[in-house]
Image: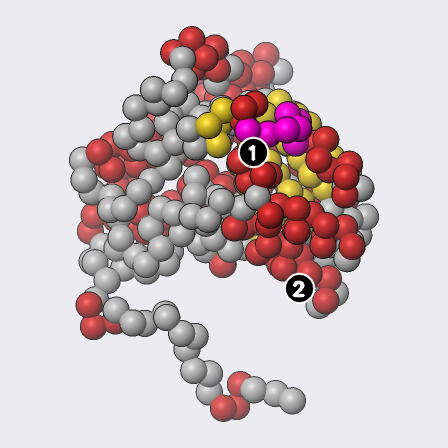
């Protein structure tokens, strides 16, 4: 969580200074969901993300320097500078991609789960999505198909109360996303998305449920984004008092309090971890700045899959 917070905070400054092209959406305040859900996953398990995907990608294990290089559009980025913030991906750790299309990752995760089933692997696919995605068709299509085929997929709704600039309570007929799961006979659980230990416990249950072939699961993690919908969003649509209330529930201080109370770490250790995370991110920035931009001569590369040698094909 400290690594994600440091990465997002630094990315915000880089974007405002003009070093990150395109758009960027931060997950500051939602770190507990990414960390809690991804910890029980294997490298071979899959995740799909949203336009707010830096935290999920980091939690799944993507290399920090190459992630930062990707945001800066450099050749050493995880997507060779082609993806940027909203399309960041790293197949080597099972991160199948952030997605600029709302609800776009649900079908991808369901397909990944189907591939695991068809090849007799016990891998699990996880789809992260926001509350706004539950009003779109792909949400219902993916849940329905996952149940019909009993696929090993975990649907994780990061309910941060806002679909872009629209308050969820004003747009959703069913306020709790878990209530929608019953319509598809999907096992579900709602959890405080700012309590990393509660999220982790729910994720352990959900991943084990899906991995043993018991079918899909839906988790609803109620959380909040501390920043606007995108970097530069003035957030005139929400009250300052609402933000202040959620700042009191910041998942990182809550986790620090819990680990100190449990005797797992002392305040000095937690502070050292925070500083180490900031140094790690600063080193990643320097790595990214030193990386060359993509070669214009390779502009069309990766539009199509590379041709395989003839002897790589088998009957």
Let me know if residue 175 appears in the view. yes
Callout 1: SS: helix
- Disc assigned to residue 22: none
How far from the left and from the top, in percent, is residue 55? 45, 38
Q: Which residue is painted at 40% across and 74% down in the image?
A: 304
| Nearest to the observer: residue 209 or residue 288 | 209
How far from the left and from the top, in percent, is residue 163? 48, 32
| Nearest to the observer: residue 40 or residue 51 | 51
Queried whether the magenta region covers residue 176, the answer comes back as yes
| Nearest to the observer: residue 152 or residue 145 | 145
How far from the left and from the top, in percent, is residue 129? 55, 40
Q: Which residue is painted at 31% across and 42% down in the image?
A: 23
Most prominent secondary structure in the magenta stretch?
loop
Corner quadrant of residue 187:
top right
Q: Name the residue beneath numbered marker 1.
A: 131
Q: Which residue is painted at 69% across and 39% down in the image?
A: 218
CA distance for labels 1 and 2: 26 Å
Classify the position of the C terminus by image quarter.
bottom right
How far from the left and from the top, in percent, is residue 242? 45, 12
Q: Would residue 171 appear left or right of 315 to someone viewing this image?
A: left
Range drawn in magenta: 171-177
Crowd around label 1: few <14 · some 14–19 · many ≥20 (10 Å):
many
- Disc assigned to residue 115: 2
């Amino acid at each position: 969580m400290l690594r994600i917070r440091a990465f997002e905070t630094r990315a915000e400054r880089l974007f405002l200074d003009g070093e990150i092209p395109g758009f960027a959406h931060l997950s500051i305040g939602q770190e507990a969901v990414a960390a809690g859900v991804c910890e029980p996953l294997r490298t071979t398990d899959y995740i799909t993300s949203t336009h707010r995907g830096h935290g999920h990608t980091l939690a799944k294990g993507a290399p920090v320097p190459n992630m930062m290089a990707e945001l800066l559009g450099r050749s050493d980025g995880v997507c060779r500078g082609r993806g940027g913030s909203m399309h960041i991906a790293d197949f080597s750790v099972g991160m199948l991609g952030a997605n600029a299309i709302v609800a776009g990752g649900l079908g991808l995760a369901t397909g990944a789960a189907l591939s695991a089933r068809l090849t007799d692997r016990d891998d699990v696919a996880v789809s992260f999505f926001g509350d706004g995605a539950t009003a779109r068709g792909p949400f219902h299509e993916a849940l329905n198909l996952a149940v019909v085929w009993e696929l090993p997929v975990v649907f994780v709704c990061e309910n941060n109360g806002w679909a872009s600039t629209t308050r969820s309570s004003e747009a959703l007929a069913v306020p709790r996303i878990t209530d929608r799961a019953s319509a598809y006979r999907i096992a579900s659980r709602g959890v405080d998305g700012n309590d990393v230990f509660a999220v982790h416990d729910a994720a352990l249950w959900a991943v084990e449920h899906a991995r043993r072939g018991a079918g899909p699961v839906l988790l609803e993690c109620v959380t909040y984004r501390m920043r606007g919908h995108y970097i530069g969003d003035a957030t005139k649509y929400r009250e300052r008092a609402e933000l202040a209330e959620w700042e009191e529930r910041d998942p990182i201080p809550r986790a620090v309090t819990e680990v100190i109370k449990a005797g797992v770490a002392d305040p000095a250790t937690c502070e050292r971890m925070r500083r180490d995370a900031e140094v790690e991110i600063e080193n990643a920035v320097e790595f990214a700045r030193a990386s060359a931009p993509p070669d214009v001569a390779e502009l069309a590369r990766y539009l199509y899959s590379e041709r395989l040698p003839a002897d790589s094909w088998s009957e």
